[in-house]
């Protein structure tokens, strides 16, 4: 196993070093464009902020709806006052981590696996997780003509989005718990794990080259719209049916230099999640409108409605589930056992939650001292 693991880790390191894959730079310039510091850096509560702009990265998919809706509705910008929000969207976690490390973004919405990898590879120097955003929204969807039970998965071709990504780790761990064998690097074994970009997976499934996929929303619901059947909702595998799918991260450099701006963004995300949960239909429409702007095409109702229902929006980063996902990656041979101590800094978030009369959230012992 040592040689495949070494090769795989090199592959993952190479993936993390991919050039920036930002596909859009949208809605730049929330707040004043004035060169006057007093108009550019005054927050909603009248306090002067320390940065003129904050650069926020996220993915154009429903599991990042806190960012989609928060920016679309101006709920994040409202807390920043004159500080401009400059958003960028990404196709993959490694490119967003690369952007954070390069200073191209300051704050990002991202999945647990790239958060873990980014922190581990920098030896704890690159980022902190400062809040949660979403839970759930991942399903195993299969061709019902070929796969009727779990045992029918043997010998079939099942897609995950990317080698070593959050869904890839989850699927490999699930396969292992079934007692089946799969080589993590090649994907070959009792089940063939095919790494396929979410953008092409529905067409590959439709053509018959894939028998199913373990994927996030809305890709899962796109497959169902093509005749697929949900064989498993990943949330059923977790205590309380909750697991982190999207974190909020910040570069340690930006957090140190601009804690007031970070706190303002977090107030915006807390208010956004509150608005989403209180206005589900409006929030769903807002997220779809944002997706249409980014991709040029809105999701049809038969995809949007079931996809939206399977994602839960929460300020809690569900830290215990991040540790579990790291353990799964280690077991699969995708990661050396990482030291995650200090990956969380939830003090700003808990300050905001407590001021709003809400309970504090836990860091599972992985917070900064």
Image (cartoon, rainbow, N blue to C red):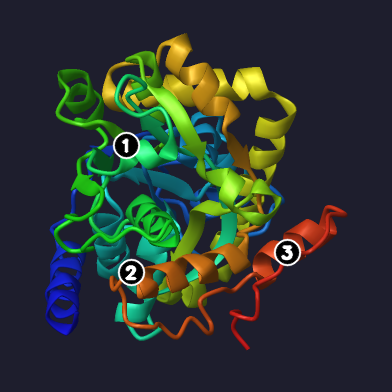
- Mark found first going from the N terminus, 2 or 3: 2
Please report the residue visible at 20 percent of the width from the left and 31 percent of the height from the top: 210
Asked if residue 116 lies left or right of residue 31, the reply is left
> Of tags 3 and 1, which is closer to the observer?
1
- Mark found first going from the N terminus, 1 or 2: 1
Query: Mark 1 falls on what kind of element?
Result: strand
Q: Residue 303, how many percent across, how many down?
A: 44, 17
**Gap between marks 1 and 2 measured at Cα:** 19 Å
Residue that extends furthest to the bottom in the rendered view of this protein: 369
160 shown above or below 3? above
Quarter of the image with the C terminus is bottom right
Q: Residue 281, how many percent across, how many down?
A: 63, 18
Residue that extends furthest to the top in the rendered view of this protein: 301
Q: Residue 243, how many percent across, how many down?
A: 58, 53
Please report the residue visible at 53 percent of the width from the left and 21 percent of the height from the top: 306
Q: Relative to the observer, which residue lies in front, 285 or 364?
A: 364
Whether the residues at callouts 1 and 2 have beta carbons within 8 Å, the answer is no
Examine the image and state in which quarter residue 338 appears.
bottom left
Residue that extends furthest to the right in the rendered view of this protein: 357
Whether the residues at callouts 2 and 3 have beta carbons within 8 Å, the answer is no
Query: Mark 3 falls on what kind of element?
Result: loop
Quarter of the image with the N terminus is bottom left
Q: Which residue is mark 1?
A: 213
Examine the image and state in which quarter residue 222 appears.
top left
Q: Which residue is mark 3?
A: 361
Name the mark on residue 332: 2
């Amino acid at each position: 196993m040592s040689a495949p693991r070494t090769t795989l880790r090199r592959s993952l390191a190479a993936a993390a070093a991919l050039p920036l894959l930002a596909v859009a730079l949208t809605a730049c310039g929330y707040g004043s464009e004035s060169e006057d510091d007093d108009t550019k850096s005054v927050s909603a509560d009248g306090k002067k902020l320390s940065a003129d702009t904050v650069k926020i990265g996220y993915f154009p998919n429903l599991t990042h709806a806190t960012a989609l809706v928060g920016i679309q509705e101006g709920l994040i910008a409202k807390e920043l006052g004159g500080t401009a929000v400059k958003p960028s969207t990404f196709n993959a976690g490694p490119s967003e981590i690369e952007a954070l490390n390069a200073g191209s973004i300051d704050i990002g919405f991202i999945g647990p696996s790239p958060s873990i990898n980014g922190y581990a590879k920098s030896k704890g120097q690159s980022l902190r997780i400062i809040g949660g955003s979403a839970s759930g929204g991942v399903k195993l969807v299969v061709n019902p003509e070929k796969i009727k039970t779990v045992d029918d998965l043997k010998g079939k071709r099942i897609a995950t989005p990317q080698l070593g990504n959050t869904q890839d780790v989850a699927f490999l761990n699930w396969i292992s718990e079934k007692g089946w064998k799969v080589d993590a690097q090649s994907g070959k074994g009792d089940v063939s794990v095919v790494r396929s970009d979410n953008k092409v997976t529905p067409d590959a499934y439709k053509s018959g080259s894939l028998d199913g996929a373990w994927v996030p929303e809305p890709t899962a619901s796109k497959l169902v719209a093509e005749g697929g059947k949900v064989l498993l909702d990943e949330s059923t595998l977790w205590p309380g049916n909750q697991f982190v799918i999207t974190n909020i991260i910040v570069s340690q450099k930006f957090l140190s230099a601009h804690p007031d701006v970070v706190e303002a963004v977090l107030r915006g995300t807390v208010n956004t999640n509150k608005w989403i949960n209180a206005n589900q239909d409006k929030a769903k429409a807002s997220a779809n409108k944002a997706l249409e702007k980014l991709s040029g095409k809105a999701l049809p109702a038969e995809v949007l409605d079931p996809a939206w229902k399977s994602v839960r929006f929460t300020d809690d980063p569900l830290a215990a589930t991040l540790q579990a996902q790291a353990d799964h990656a280690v077991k699969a041979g995708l990661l050396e056992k990482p030291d995650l101590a200090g990956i969380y800094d939830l003090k700003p978030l808990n300050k905001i939650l407590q001021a709003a009369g809400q309970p504090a959230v836990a860091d599972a012992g992985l917070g900064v001292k």
